[in-house]
Image (tube, grey):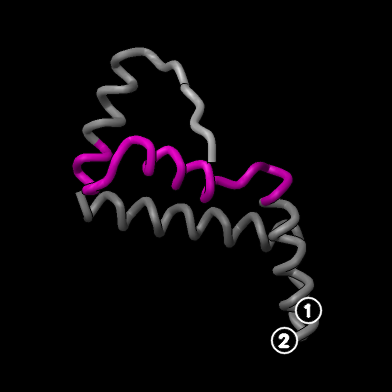
């Protein structure tokens, strides 16, 4: 694997260093994990469609766009609440 240099302002580098240190890892690993775990909008749509198809096939549940958006909002709210209490 070849390395590449990413130029960021010093403040961003310093922030990444603080985050990496608090997680017991390196900036390199932090950036790699972010890149591997972050989905594009298209990847999220594809995953949602696969999930809908699975629910329909295995559970007989048809999820429409409104229900999907509502559940997404509920999940974001629940996770935001968990992050607030973890801080």
* Residue for point 31% across, 57% down: 82
* Residue for point 68% across, 63% down: 67
Q: Is residue 26 above or below residue 68?
A: above
Residue 77 horizontal side relative to residue 62, left or right: left
* Location of residue 68 in the rendering, given as x and y in whole percent from the top left corner: 67, 60
* Location of residue 26 in the rendering, given as x and y in whole percent from the top left corner: 29, 40
* Location of residue 40 in the rendering, given as x and y in whole percent from the top left corner: 65, 42
* Location of residue 34 in the rendering, given as x and y in whole percent from the top left corner: 46, 43
Residue 24 is one of the magenta-drawn residues: yes
* Residue for point 38% across, 43% down: 29
In this view, the residue farthest toward the top is: 9
Q: Is residue 43 above or below residue 56?
A: above
**Residue 19: quarter of image:** top left
Name the main secondary structure of what is drawn in magenta. Answer: helix
Residue on which the image places disc 1: 56
Residue 41 is one of the magenta-drawn residues: yes
Q: Which residues are magenta?
A: 19-43
Residue on which the image places disc 2: 59
Residue 70 horizontal side relative to residue 76, left or right: right
């Amino acid at each position: 694997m070849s390395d590449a240099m990413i130029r960021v302002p010093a403040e961003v580098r310093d922030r990444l260093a603080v985050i990496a240190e608090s997680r017991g890892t390196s900036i390199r690993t932090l950036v790699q994990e972010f890149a591997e775990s972050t989905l594009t909008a298209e990847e999220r749509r594809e995953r949602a469609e696969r999930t809908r198809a699975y629910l329909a096939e295995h559970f007989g549940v048809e999820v429409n766009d409104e229900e999907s958006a509502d559940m997404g909002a509920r999940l974001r709210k629940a996770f935001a609440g968990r992050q607030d209490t973890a801080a």
